[in-house]
Amino acid sequence: MRDTADYLDQLKRHPAAMWLGFALVGAALAALPFVVGLGGQTWVRIANLALLYVMLALGLNIVVGFAGLLDLGYIAFYAVGAYSYALLASPHFGLHLPFWIILPVGFLVACVFGVLLGAPVLRLRGDYLAIVTLGFGEIIRIFLNNLNAPVNITNGPQGITLIDPVRLGSLSLATTERFAGLTFTGPVKYYYLLLVLVLVIIVINVRLQDSRIGRAWEAIREDEIAAQAMGINLRNIKLLAFAMGASFGGVAGGMFSAIQGFISPESFGLFESIIVLTMVVLGGMGNIPGVILGAVLLSVFPEALRYMSPLQNAVFGRELIDAEAARLLIFGLAMVLIMLFRPAGLLPSDVRKRELAMRSD
Amino acid sequence: MLLELIGLEVAYGGIKAVKGIDLAVARGELVCLIGANGAGKTTTLKAVCGLVYPRAGRVYYDGDDITGTPSHRPVARGLAMVPEGRGIFRQLTVEENLAMGAFVRGDRQGVRRDLEQVFELFPRLAERRTQSGGTLSGGEQQMLAIGRAMMSRPKLLLLDEPSMGLAPLLVQRIFQTVQEISREGVTILLIEQNARLALEIAVRGYVMESGTITLAGPAAELLADPKVREAYLGEIVAAEPAIERDRA
């Protein structure tokens, strides 16, 4: 990271080079759906899924990476956001609110749930916090599963169907359109919307990390009593971490609803929480580029495995391992290897690197 | 009085750790609170900082009742604390630790100036500015903790056992610095087991024993008090005349 930081410093001294870099990355990101689209729309959908996971991982990174609060029920906020969107834009209640109303609503509802979870666990840390948040995640899922009686709110295990796609004015993101000689399919349009949201979240994250709030999170992660002695309001700063993390999860959930058109409680199980946490830890807790990398790798990886069997057929003439069935095994193995060789994550934050260096002293 | 405790009582569950004490620190004073392990000194300090809620009694700071208010509030009003065991942010660098001490302040230039001042006070910290707090020695960590507390430009500095776990020579050095800080006009309440050193630099002292204040007065008087000398300075008072007779 030191090298990257130095590199960034150098870049700052050459604004032209910096803007050129941004332009190149921007162009690559803008062209991406058309490039991967050559292999079929499935790949655009995978890119969208990766962007959703990047949002989730960045949100969880605030809670786990910045503030050091281990949250094992993070997916609950994704669920809350997804159901907020689904209930406000589907035939289930007959509501079809516009996107620019639902998005902030999803954000706020998830934010409130973040505070609801945060308030009772203010005094907890480490293992105890992990257990309570794990329970919270399950409670939300079980509620969603059972809130179809006596009053049908969530439609229970059947889930909610026919959720409206995102509409911005007269532009529906679900239909295919041709513009300037390019074909913009539904997934491609969603890709650009997700990309914008991800960029906004990245900017907020970077700004937060460098702010007083970011420093306060750093302090409570290290030592709560000392942080209080520095004049940090422990309660507010912890609640803020939960609320900020949750609201990003909520936005991601809303987008998930819109893209899928169908949601049910089983999409929001414990395993999803663990996957998102894995992305954060594996990429590099507390380091924004690392977390993004972790999210992209881990969301694309299982999809890439689908291509293993044709590959094996081509190389060995038959299928040696059923990659689909061995998905979790390969996943686990990759995790173990990465943690062995890069224990602070693929792109560790400076602080995590120091921590590990200190332990080996 | 900058800090005043009236009838302070703190209990952990059913056990009273502090049994109704009165203590006052005037502006500019260096006051020490001495006593053995478990006498209730740290608990008293925690009650002042709002880290534990007192069962009875009041805490006044700078004219206001701060009994039981969460600790960030008095801190924002110039109360700085060096917690027991120093409370260094181990993974942050020396400089980041010091910057954290100025968390409640908004004046960036003043903070930068004070940073240089702390480095003047403790040149050792300047040498180690980019090193992480956890890699410092015990003495350096204590310097860092005091320096960090100074970064908030405190009116009142609460020190909890700065001598803990340090080599005698380092303790001397730390106490000298405490005295220097006091001379600069910062009011200090020093909590110490090392009674002799604390009384030597303090103006006044309180002696705490199992939750109550048993003696109070000017530090010089306490240093001469036979009870204090026997209990806290490790001298055998009764044997003294005999030694003098031998010399004669």
Image: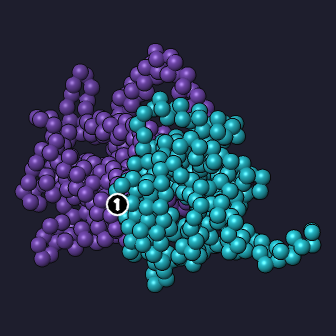
A33 shown above or below A326: above
Give the number of marks.
Answer: 1
> At 19% across and 31% down in the image, what residue appears?
A177
Position of residue A58 measured from the top left corner of the image (x, y, whole percent): 40, 47
Up-down relation of residue A289 to residue B7 (above or below): above
Residue at image point 14% right, 67% down = A153
Q: Residue furthest front?
A: B248
Q: Circle 1 sits on which residue?
A: B65
Which residue type does callout 1 highlight?
A: Asp
Give the drawing colour for chain B. Answer: cyan
Secondary element at tag 1: strand
Residue at mark 1: chain: B
- Looking at the rendering, in which quadrant would you find the C terminus of chain B? bottom right
Is B125 positioned to the left or the right of A214 in the image? right
List x then y, in percent, for residue B19.
Answer: 48, 78
What shade does chain A have? purple
Q: Nearer the viewer, residue B147 or B5?
A: B5
Q: Can residue A244 be seen here?
A: yes
Say few, some or many: other residues with alpha carbon within 10 Å of mark 1 (under 14 / 14 to 19 / 20 or more).
some
